[in-house]
Amino acid sequence: TALAEPGAQDIINAALPQLQTNLAAGATQFTTDWPQIIATAKTLAPQAEIYVTTLYDPISPQDPLYAVFDPVIQAMNAVIMTPSAGYQVADVYTAFKTYEGTDPLVNFNWYAGSLDPHPTTAGHALIYQTHLIAQPIE
């Protein structure tokens, strides 16, 4: 509904610089936090097999917000994909990007006013499939 309001695009455009700054700061913090999170998991459960998913981008490449969010998601995924990190990686990002099916994988659709970034049933099924083929990064 907010997207349909007159002037909404102007408000969103005005907020983009601050949004980009905040996203970049969050991605930078993730670079520090992620190794600590994994180390803690390994300490608490040294015998556990750890599976990690990469982050998918719920935003379509045709969406104006794609250029804002996708580079941040890719930067965070680069941290997750650290070679020899000692966990299995389910590369959900790549699976979503290379998906050739017709069912939508996420609920997010800027143009329809749906801002829900969560996976659909088809998206959850694809995430499950990526876990079945998860590999260590070498």
Image: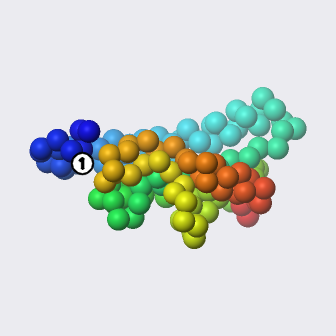
Do we see residue 111 in this rendering?
Answer: yes
Look at 68% across and 47% down and name the residue there.
52
Helix, strand or loop at label 1? It is: helix
Do we see residue 76 in this rendering?
Answer: no
Quadrant where the C terminus sits is bottom right
The answer to whether residue 3 is above or below residue 132 is above
Residue 48: give x, y in percent of width and height.
84, 39
Q: Is residue 77 left or right of residue 125?
A: left
Residue 108: give x, y in percent of width and height.
42, 49
Farthest residue, direction top: 44
Q: Around disc 1, counting alpha carbons within 10 Å, would you say few (fewer than 14), some (14 to 19), or many (20 or more)?
A: few
Coloring scheme used = rainbow
User: In front: 24, or 69?
Assistant: 69
Q: Which residue is mark 1?
A: 16
Look at 54% across and 55% down and name the residue there.
105
Residue 22: give x, y in percent of width and height.
33, 41
